[in-house]
Amino acid sequence: MLELAAIAKQFDDRAGVSHRALDGVSLSVGEHEIVALVGTSGCGKSTLLRIVAGLEAPSRGRVTIRGRPVTGPSPEVGMVFQEPRLMPWLSVRENVRLALLDLPRDEQERRIDAVLAQVGLSRFADALPRQLSGGMAQRAAIARALVRRPSVLLLDEPFSALDSFTRMKLQDHLLDLWAGARFTLIFVTHDVEEAVILADRVVVMRHPGRVQRELPVALPRPRRRSGAEVQALKEEIVRELDLT
Amino acid sequence: MSESTTIVRRRRFVGAFGSVPRALRAGRGLLLPLALLVLWRLLSGEIVPAHLLPSPGAVLEELVELARRGELLGHLGASAGRVALGFALGVLAATLLGALAGASRLARELLDPTVQALKAVPSLAWVPLFILWFGIFETSKVLLIAVGVFFPVYLNLMTGILSVDRKLVEVGRINRLSRLAIIRRILVPATLPSYLVGLRAGLALGWMFVIAAELMGASEGLGFLMVDGQMTGRPAIIIGALVLFAVAGKLSDALLERLSRRLLRWQDSFGAAEAGHA
């Protein structure tokens, strides 16, 4: 449902020197599939995600979702960043509303209530971001990305700033949300275990912006973090990363 | 979801350093003025001759006498009116130009070097020119105050806009907010803290410049009162006017501070946490 065709991206830095962030990445993601992008820092994973989100245009190549080219941000695609990026002056409810401004007011309220219940933040609808813990703030950000019921959800290292206990809970929570709404999920991570626990397929990228290898994760869910297959896959991915 | 039940209480934690009853806290700020008053009383007439430093009682008497004749409110009103008008004009101009320079790179490149150069001119240096252009009456006074107010407001607004977190603006983009909606819902609230600091600095300068404006010639106002006291050899009047300036400046600043606190309740800063317990 999501096609990346030979995506390339070049940046000019302030000195006018051209840098290659992505060098012909092609990727085909199926309906309801979960894809993890892993790779060393600076290999272009985040740039790829930003291009799919429509925040940046590729220098070459094109992105299509269900056959329609991506030309800019659209309600079809939700995005969660590494930081929650909540407006500190708005309550959780009003932060989520930012994704719904073009809808009628009663529709906004209905959707906000529903999505906050889904992420378990109903009681904190009127709390300000500074009153939230890191995990709660990131769940509010996920609510803001999901409230539009996108067919594609993009997450850019969404749990990397959280402690490992909160991270595991949010990973499970994300799978619950995915099982309920069945969106296509693409996420960038540095955490190999996170990739194996969540994804149907792990895409290993290498510098400068190419796909090194794709590894299918054909394990039934829920996956046990300490399970032998999970460990074996983790080791294989780490080996692959060492080659990059 | 046990995590969701533990809302973080950072405010209480920080506030614990200063949890003193409200009345006592308000009183603390008066301790130093009271001590100065006592010192003043001790010095006056004993160590320093009364014709240089009249006693607090003499100053109060002079002020009461002025009030009884109905002149005190007139002088206070004249100065406050000039500050208010000059402040309004200065803030208006600074808000327009500061917003322009903050929002548009082109406008900033065209505008900012000139504004910065004008800022380097000591504001009192405008006095002769303003008198030449606008005469010695209200216009030149109000404009001088407006000039003083302009620079801190302009500077704080512009740098405030420039330092808005690009990541928050991106949230607006990904949610397809229009340019106007991004300004109204993200840029304006994010710039507000810095803008309010500019307003307070501007107001302080406004009070500073009203004196300068009134010293250059006026028939009423606190500055006139001081000149009058000097000419007629009445130090109690000079000191009385000084005290009135301090009180008026402090009161108007307290209004702005209150407004800031109300508008910035969302801030997660040490100061905000303390204020929450004041």
Image (spheres, coloured by chain):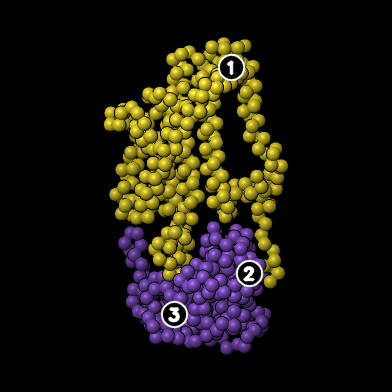
Chain colours: A purple, B yellow
Q: Position of residue B121 (x, y in %)?
A: 34, 34
Under tag 1, what secondary structure?
helix
Q: Nearer the viewer, residue A105 or B252?
A: A105
Q: Which residue is mark 3?
A: A211
Q: Amino acid at mark 3?
A: Val
Say which residue appears at 44% left-offset and 46% top-offset: B156
Crowding near the residue tagged with mark 1, few <14, some 14–19, many ≥20 C-alpha atoms within 10 Å: some
**Which corner quadrant of the image does residue B210 belong to?**
top left
Whichever of callouts 3 and 2 sits on the residue coming sooner in the sequence is 2
Vertical position of residue A235 compared to residue B202: above or below: below
Q: Quadrant of the C terminus of chain B?
A: top right
Question: Please, is residue B66 above or below residue B278 in the view?
Answer: above
Tell me, for residue B124, which label it has, or none: none
| The N terminus of chain B: image quadrant | bottom right
Q: Is residue B228 left or right of residue A172?
A: left
Which amino acid type is marked by label 1? Ala
Identify which amino acid the numbered label 2 is placed on.
Leu
Q: Residue at 52% x, 64% y: name it.
A: A85
Q: Is residue A115 left or right of residue B75?
A: right
- Chain letter of disc 1? B
Q: Are marks 3 and 2 on the same chain?
A: yes
Q: At 52% from the left edge and 21% from the top edge, which residue is drawn?
A: B69
**Residue beneath label 2, please?**
A121
Q: Secondary structure at mark 2?
A: loop
Give the letter of the chain under mark 2: A
